[in-house]
Image (cartoon, rainbow, N blue to C red):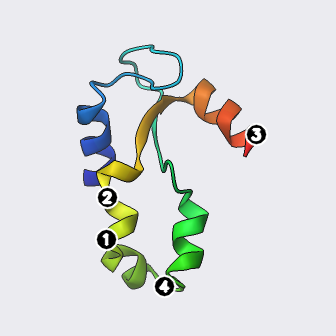
Amino acid sequence: RQWRSDIFTRDNFTCQGCGIRGGVNLNADHYPKLFSEIFKENNIKVLQEALACEEFWNVNNGRTLCENCHSLIGRKR
């Protein structure tokens, strides 16, 4: 929750894809490194390993997206 909140605050609750600000439909997206890449590279198998992985919670690896942009980007990946 803290990582998500920090991403939203840093991005001023504004979608980094389309520029829409605010709303309840914002998502915190792992970017530029994908969520799955971090898991694989760090060989994360259990929740405790994920919680201890600093890279996973780094705000420099996140951005705010609205649900629509998150969905569109997800399809491209």
Residue 47 in percent (x, y) is at 43, 79
Numbered badge on residue 75: 3
Q: Is residue 37 visible?
A: yes
Tell me the amino acid under the disc marked 4.
Val
> Which residue does the numbered mark 1 point to in the structure image?
54
Q: Residue at x 40, y 65 (%)?
A: 56
Find out whether the residues at labels 2 and 1 contact each other: C-beta distance under 8 Å. yes
Find out whether the residues at labels 3 and 1 contact each other: C-beta distance under 8 Å. no
CA–CA distance in space, label 4 to label 1: 15 Å
Numbered badge on residue 7: none
Secondary structure of residue under mark 3: helix
Counting residues from the start of the chain, the first of labels 2 and 4 encountered is 4
> Which residue does the numbered mark 2 point to in the structure image?
58
Find out whether the residues at labels 3 and 2 contact each other: C-beta distance under 8 Å. no
CA–CA distance in space, label 2 to label 4: 19 Å
Q: Is residue 75 above or below residue 45?
A: above
Counting residues from the start of the chain, the first of labels 3 and 1 encountered is 1
CA–CA distance in space, label 2 to label 1: 6 Å
Decide: few, some or many residues near mark 4? Use Cα within 10 Å; few <14, some 14-19, many ≥20.
Answer: few
**Quarter assignment of residue 24:** top left
Tell whether 69 sits left or right of 72: left
Residue 42 in percent (x, y) is at 49, 81
Residue 62 in percent (x, y) is at 41, 46
Tell me the amino acid under the disc marked 3.
Arg
> Which residue does the numbered mark 4 point to in the structure image?
46
